[in-house]
Image (cartoon, coloured by chain):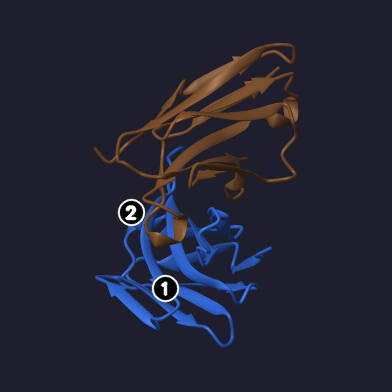
Amino acid sequence: DTEVTQTPKHLVMGMTNKKSLKCEQHMGHRAMYWYKQKAKKPPELMFVYSYEKLSINESVPSRFSPECPNSSLLNLHLHALQPEDSALYLCASSHRAVNTGELFFGEGSRLTVL
Amino acid sequence: GENVEQHPSTLSVQEGDSAVIKCTYSDSASNYFPWYKQELGKRPQLIIDIRSNVGEKKDQRIAVTLNKTAKHFSLHITETQPEDSAVYFCAASPKDTGGGADGLTFGKGTHLIIQP
């Protein structure tokens, strides 16, 4: 199984809603990531979970909060989002740290904030 | 932190010709340089990567070169085909110090268009 599975594939939410994006991998990878990608832009790193430690990109607003229930799951909780948060959210995993090998991306969750 | 510059932003070549995309990086501690291809509406997928102890790597029609001194690396695609049309991202990553991964820093991307 070389898949990173993300759910849901599409999400529409209002600015007062609370929702979650889920990401799962069964490759035994020890590092997982959330990236945000706007149209025609590169992926931007939001969070990294590696070596049982969560690292946060300081530019990410607190309305995004990650949760790692176990080493194969990395969820992203969304609360009080803004329309500019509409984007493709990509989850990824790697064997250990990203520079030890390939970064596997999920298909993404396309988020629209109304 | 790392800064990756990528050029050109758009590249149009005739089918069968070669395409070259160039990237520079700022952090001399970076030692892993992958290239990703992203087709419209799909996820990025790794096509080739290179580590700092290697100067060149080739996989069929795709090759990557790395110049550590100048801090730049390039993607070369020969005998281009219509299915090569996509956005290509270069990326860089620092050495894993054991304290947790910083993740990849991506270039802005190159939209490669293969003209029939």
- Give the residue type that dot 1 points to: Arg
Please state, as top left, top right, bottom left or bottom right, where the N terminus of chain B lies in the image: bottom right
Residue drawn at x 40%, y 52% is A96
Instruction: Give residue B51's mark.
Output: 1
Q: Position of residue B13 (x, y in %)?
A: 45, 68
* Residue A73 image label: none
List x then y, in percent, for residue B50.
40, 71
What chain is the brown one? A
- Indicate the chain on which mark 1 is placed: B
Residue at the (55%, 78%) spot, across then down: B72
Q: In terms of secondary structure, where does tag 2 sit?
A: helix
Q: Quadrant of residue A25?
A: top left
Label 2 belongs to which residue? Answer: B83
- Please check whether the numbered discs 1 and 2 fall on a single chain: yes
| Residue nearer the viewer, B9 or B45 | B45
Identify the residue at horizontal 45%, vertical 42% (top origin): A92
Q: Give the letter of the chain under mark 2.
A: B
Closer to the observer: label 1 or label 2?
1
**Disc 1 residue crowd, few under 14, some 14–19, many 20+, Cα 10 Å:** some
Which numbered disc flags the more N-terminal residue, 1 or 2? Answer: 1
Judging depth in this view, the residue of A105 and A49 nearest the camera is: A49
Disc 1 is placed on an element classified as: strand
The image position of residue B39, as x and y in percent, is: 43, 46
**Which chain's colour is blue?**
B
Work out whether residue A84 or residue A6 is closer to the camera in this orientation and state it. A6
Q: CA distance from mark 1 to mark 2?
A: 27 Å
The residue depicted at 60 percent of the width and 62 percent of the height is: B9
Percent of width and height locating residue A97: 45, 55
